Image (spheres, rainbow, N blue to C red):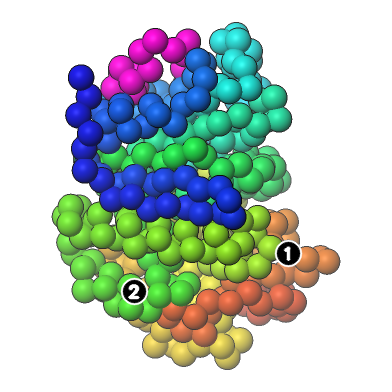
């Protein structure tokens, strides 16, 4: 018999639709909570070969009585491909999945993005549930309905907006998370504060040591605060026509760094960390923000163990070429999320490439 556990609940409301984000310890075992989100008799659990041995059996116990199977990816961003979406769709076909079937994403951002896109494609859209197992996916990619896959030309160039039925953020899964991946998740927490919440940024500065040490009270508060902030943004702009684009602070630089490194040099959160700092330097160069704000961001990134420099071997011209493919660009001109200081991000169109290249050249020369 399953015991219902306590959890913080944050509702994502999109017009007449809504879904819960549950945050707490032991929620994967709280079958009574999340099983209710499954409407039909078929389920496909998409995970990877690192996460599945740790948690798939616990999820499977909650699927008793259903027709279900699993599809496992290799671990890493390089496996978020069309080829794997095709294999996942074949797995749904082998299962005999009907329109009331559900895809369950058990893993980090790669698993969640691919599982959500697979669910969006099967019979033009079936249910899916997010069970994020990394800090980054708990605070960012599992919330808001962005799904997709990568192409050689760039990251997340193909995808769909497809909202989950529920998000189950079991913080017990973070206990086994490698230090580097945990820190990468903190980059997304910092990003939310840098965009629009200076008070939260100050709180992060005060609690950087506790967060780096995975102190549970501070961790749950940080996750909940970031999710609430994103929930508000998504509710106001579900398909990224305006305000939601602000959530991409650091991503134009960061995605270019990830792509140039073939998704093996930097984790996504590490790319966002370096990218945020480069965006702050570009803002400063354009006269939008003060140097003190750049320094403040760099100090917080350092305090949480995140990278702040471009890795060796990267070329500024190549990075600029990759940035021209960014989804935020309009009419062939570069569009960035920049800021006027901590907590005051904005969309800036028509940024002169010479300024971007100057920031990139300086960053590549500092290695």
User: Quick check: 3 left or right of 168?
Assistant: left
Above-or-below relation of 181 to 305: above
Quadrant into which the N terminus falls: top left
Secondary structure at badge 2 equals helix
Q: Is residue 203 visible?
A: yes
Above-or-below relation of 288 to 310: below
Secondary structure at badge 1 equals loop
Asked whether residue 215 is drawn in magenta, I would say: no
User: Could you say where residue 344 lies in the image, as x and y percent from the top left?
Assistant: 49, 80
Above-or-below relation of 119 to 281: above
Please identify, in this view, whether the residue under mark 2 or under mark 1 is nearer the observer: 2
Q: Residue shown at 58%/64% (left/top)?
A: 236
Relative depth, front residue between 326 and 356: 326
User: Quick check: 272 left or right of 126?
Assistant: left
Find residue 291 and report its image quarter: bottom left
Q: Residue shown at 21%/74% (left/top)?
A: 206
Find residue 31 and report its image quarter: top left
Q: Is residue 253 visible?
A: no
Task: Give the distance between the C-alpha atoms of the residues marked 2 and 1, in whole angstroms.
Answer: 28 Å
User: Could you say where residue 32 lies in the image, as x and y percent from the top left?
Assistant: 30, 28
User: Which residue ends up furthest to the right in the rendered image?
Assistant: 331
Give me the disc on residue 201: 2
Badge 2 or badge 1: first in the primary sequence = 2
Give me the disc on residue 270: none
User: Quick check: 154 left or right of 30?
Assistant: right
Q: Residues within 10 Å of mark 2 (few under 14, many from 20)?
A: many
Q: Please provide the residue range marked out in magenta.
A: 55-71
**How many marks do you count on the picture?**
2
Q: Residue shown at 70%/57% (left/top)?
A: 327
Give me the disc on residue 329: 1
């Amino acid at each position: 018999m399953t015991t219902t556990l306590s959890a913080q609940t944050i509702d994502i409301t999109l017009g007449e639709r809504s879904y819960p984000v549950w945050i707490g310890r032991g929620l994967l075992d709280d079958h009574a909570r999340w099983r209710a989100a499954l409407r039909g008799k078929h389920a496909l659990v998409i995970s990877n070969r690192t996460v599945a041995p740790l948690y798939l059996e616990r999820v499977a116990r909650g699927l008793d009585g259903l027709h279900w199977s699993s599809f496992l990816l290799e671990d890493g961003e390089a496996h978020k491909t069309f080829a794997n979406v095709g294999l996942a769709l074949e797995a749904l076909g082998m299962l005999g999945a009907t329109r009331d079937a559900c895809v369950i994403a058990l893993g980090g951002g790669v698993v969640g993005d691919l599982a959500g896109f697979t669910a969006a494609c099967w019979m033009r859209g079936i249910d899916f549930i997010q069970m994020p197992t990394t800090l980054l996916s708990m605070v960012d990619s599992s919330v808001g309905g962005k799904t997709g896959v990568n192409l050689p030309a760039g990251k997340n160039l193909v995808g769909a907006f497809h909202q989950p039925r529920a998000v189950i953020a079991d913080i017990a899964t973070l206990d086994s998370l490698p230090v580097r991946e945990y820190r990468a998740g903190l980059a997304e927490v910092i990003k939310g504060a840098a965009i629009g919440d200076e008070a939260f940024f100050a709180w992060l500065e005060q609690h950087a040591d506790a967060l780096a040490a995975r102190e549970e009270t501070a961790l749950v508060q940080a996750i909940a605060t970031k999710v609430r902030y994103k929930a508000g943004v998504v509710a106001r702009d579900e398909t990224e026509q305006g305000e939601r684009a602000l959530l991409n602070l650091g991503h134009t630089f960061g995605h270019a760094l990830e792509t140039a490194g073939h998704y093996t040099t930097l984790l996504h959160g590490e790319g966002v960390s370096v990218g945020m700092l480069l965006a702050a330097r570009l803002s400063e160069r354009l006269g939008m923000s003060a140097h003190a704000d750049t320094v403040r961001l760099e100090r917080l990134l350092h305090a949480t163990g995140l990278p702040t420099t471009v890795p060796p071997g990267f070329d500024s011209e190549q990075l600029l070429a990759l940035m021209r493919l960014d989804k935020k660009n309009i009419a062939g001109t570069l569009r960035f999320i920049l800021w006027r200081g901590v907590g005051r991000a904005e969309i800036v169109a028509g940024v002169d490439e010479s300024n971007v290249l100057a920031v990139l050249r300086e960053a590549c020369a500092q290695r």
